[in-house]
Image: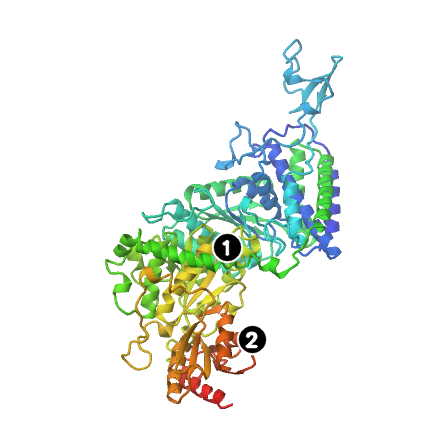
Amino acid sequence: MTTPHDLDDRLRAELAALGAPDQRRDLGEPLPDGGALTGAQALALFDAQLTSRLLDLAGRWLSGFGEGYFTVESAGHEGDAAVAAALRPTDPALLHARSGAFYCLRAAQAAGAFPAAPPDLPPATGADAPPTTPEPGRSWSESAPPGAVSYQDLDGPGAGETEAGSLPVGAGIVVDADGDATVVVPDLPQPAPDDAFAAAARDVLRGIVASAEEPAAGGRAKVFGRADLAVVPTTSAAGSHLPRAVGLGLALERLRRGARPADGEAEAAPWPADAVVVCAFDDGAADHAAATAALNTTGWYDHTGLRIPVLFVCADGGASAEGWVAATLRARPGIRYFAADGTDVAATYRVAAEAAEWVRRQRRPAVLHLSTVRLMEQGDGDAARDPLLATARLLVTSGYASGEELLARYDERGWQLRRVAEEVLDEPKLASPVEIVRELAPRRPVRVSRAVAEAAAHAAGPGAGARAEAFGGKPPELTGPLTLAQSINAALADGMLDHPGTAVFGYDVAAQGGVYGVTEGLRDRFGAARVFDTLPDATSILGLGLGAGLAGLLPVPEIRHLTLLHGAEDQLRGEAATMRFLSRGAFRNPMVVRVPGLASPEGLGGHDRNDDSLGALRDVPGLVVAVPARPDDAAPMLRTCLAAARVDGSVCVFVEPIALYHVRDLYTDGDDEWTTEYAEPGAWADRHVPIGRARVYGIGSAEDLTIITFGNGVRMSLRAAATLAEEGVGSRVVDLRWLAPLPVADIIRESSATGRVLVVDETRRTGGVGEGVLSALVDTGYVGAARRVAALDSFVPLGPAARQVLVSAEAITQGARTLLAR
């Protein structure tokens, strides 16, 4: 195992041994072998690489005395600086934990500190040269003695008498005040104390020490991210950011192609129309489910003719079986394969520029496979392929620098980073819960309410004509009582009319209206660009939503069944819910995920289609979890979720009870009491349902018992309450409606009103919603009686057996009697 000390000593020794070039070359000249880089560009790449390497060493140094909290090194992966150089600083980048050199070079690009190629040197295979400023430091003529005159400035006798080729390339003749001429070779310019690389290093060091001044997460996490660098912060855990990259690429291309309705414009994406998305990952992530899903989805879309301008960059450090990563990446249909030696910046730049230009021109996906090493994680045998040393050799053999100059540069940057590290140690840390959670999930209920009112005013006013046309001349408020499914369908249509950036998608949601017909007819009304089908994979569907939200759209993906969502929950927990947390609100991914869920007492489809587990969703910080039970709640709750996503960037999961989709009756067959009229736009504001507010039904006197429930439990509890009313027991049934955040104030108020609480929880006893309700009661000092009726700790079996484990109206009635008998 190579230690940081070994790595530093070996590099220093190798640099010192490189010696001086036989012939000195000016930094503005291209590489002598005809490569697309100039000496100044190669030196800038070296600066990015050595800055990244020194950050690795600084991280180990800081952790050695308990002040550093992150030590994942980029050592051996520094060739990705050339990938950054081949892209534009406005191309959105989703990086992984070993992308230090990429980040440093991107910072230099954005600051205009990456030198441009001279006009007579075309960029490598169409690579776009970013805007630049001159290379910092001194030119050779500026290093001449006082009063000296540059040879190029002479036009008198003797000018031009030196034979061509007799001077080192880039050298000049300096004539002093006495007329003596001297051949002068330029010194290598030294890095400025506060240049772009030092600024990038400060960003990273702030992250390592958890400084509250860190520009991405503000001390909440160590990530590569900055909005002004177009670097989107990611956890990059096991390739979990790849599905988002696919979604972002698809969304940018749809926006570029003008896939918007004629009556409005979607929110402008923060990136240029011809931007490409770059997504970096390593070979360890290539075999994980999220990465596999993303690559498969990308290829599928390309196969179907939809364009996704994404450049995947896989840094292959040899952790997998030899040849495996190359074989799997080459075999991906619909994804163009490029490969380069990631330790050779010239080769990497050439191939990366070709790949980036191909993606930008074709608007199609590609993967760049870079062979790299992990210098502080593997044996000494990989040290010979150190990319930093390879770049140093290139600079020396090409005539741009000596080994001693590069060593001095390494030392100077090292001292610079040491000073920066000591400075950031004194910066404040996050010191209060409020500071930490401030950007997690802002709640601005007044603005959300105002957004709903504005949508209502538009639907009733300027948008009335378009609304009437969309509904075929018969808006839903004129069609009679609606079921839960019909109410959601109408609310989705109204939401799409209100915000032209809204997109509804999922497996079969367009062609077939979804598994339960909830999205039926939406594609005919709004077109295939806004309502479209996807692969059935939940990870890919959520990834599309994550990218679309990041691009400025309002995605409403549907996951067919709650059971499928569990296999993709990290896209919600690790990616969606963390975006504001990791970027101090600079980035957001608004999204409303619709999920048919919960269970049916008939056990139709068995465990595959019946799932009563919501604990994993309620455990995600900041996630909004809504469960509408009645049609007249479903529409306003969906409007609230859409408004919260637009106003606050909220991520909402809208769990729709399958068993209640098409129910019409409550107490007796034909009573139609589970259907309701759809509210006309003029009533939307008055019927607005804020996040975290419950609904209360009074049965009888409503003074004896409080039943707290949600979803399917609402209908069953109302039926049980009617039975109890015949026995003289007055009940108040509280429909939570929102499971995260829980309506705690309503829970306490309604529980205290009777002093007897029956919690009806159709999720399981262990880890179920009921535990959260009882905890809220205890935490707020409730002293009355309480009891639970909950589903058993079992999966839902097939057929009538489901009734043995699920909650029933009879069980609720019996539980209430037991509680009242205390």
566 vs 620, nearest the viewer? 620
Q: Quadrant of the N terminus?
A: bottom right
Residue for badge 1:
242
- Does 810 appear above or below 94? below
Q: Position of residue 367 (x, y in %)?
A: 49, 49
Q: Secondary structure at mark 1?
A: helix
Q: Position of residue 155 (x, y in %)?
A: 63, 12
Q: Amino acid at mark 1?
A: Leu
Residue occupying image coordinates x 69% and y 27%: 186
Q: Secondary structure at mark 2?
A: helix
Residue for badge 2:
775
Residue occupying image coordinates x 50% and y 55%: 242
Q: Residue pushed farthest left?
A: 473
In the picture provided, is 226 more to the left or to the right than 468?
right
251 vs 703, nearest the viewer? 703
- Does 110 appear above or below 498? above
Q: Earlier in the sequence, mark 1 or mark 2?
A: 1
Q: Amino acid at mark 2?
A: Ser
For label 2, count other residues whose C-alpha is less than 10 Å away and answer few (under 14), some (14-19) or many (20+). few
Which scheme is used to colour this image of the protein?
Answer: rainbow
